Amino acid sequence: MMKSNSQINVPEARDAMDKFKMEAANEVGVNLKNGYNGDLTSREAGSVGGQMVKKMIESYERNMK
């Protein structure tokens, strides 16, 4: 069986990803807090993830030029 490797092992990368997640949540109006966020709806969590992907794609496209 294949093991998932979705954990971030570099502390600096984890901090940057957490900051990025908070910025994306703020942009879509989701009240994200540090720590446990199990009270979010699937829609709210998905909108944060979707915003993160959108911003990553935009960044990639800008750097391609």
Image (cartoon, grey):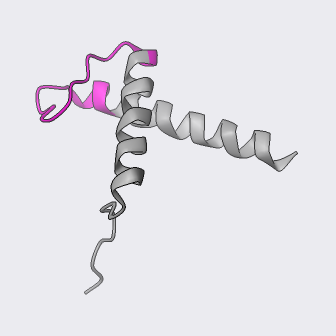
Q: Quadrant of the C terminus?
A: top right
Q: Residue 38 versus residue 41: which sits nearer the camera?
A: 38
In the picture, measured across the screen, residue 62 lies left or right of residue 39, that is: right
Percent across and percent down for residue 16 are 42, 43
65 in relation to 34, above or below: below
Q: Residue 27 versus residue 1: which sits nearer the camera?
A: 27
State which quadrant residue 3 falls in. Answer: bottom left
State which quadrant residue 42 falls in. Answer: top left
Q: Residue 24 versus residue 10: which sits nearer the camera?
A: 10
Percent across and percent down for residue 56 are 59, 41
Q: Is residue 35 magenta?
A: yes
Percent across and percent down for residue 46 are 35, 33
> As drawn, which residue projects farthest toward the bottom?
1
Question: Which residue is at 78% across, 39% downward?
Answer: 62
Provide the major secondary structure of the magenta segment. Answer: loop
Percent across and percent down for residue 39 are 11, 26
22 in relation to 8, above or below: above
Q: Quadrant of the N terminus?
A: bottom left
> As drawn, which residue projects farthest toward the front?
12
> As drawn, which residue projects farthest toward the top?
29
31 in relation to 12, above or below: above
Question: Which residue is at 16% across, 31% downward?
Answer: 37
Q: Is residue 17 magenta?
A: no
Question: Which residue is at 33% across, 70% downward?
Answer: 5
Magenta stretch?
27-45
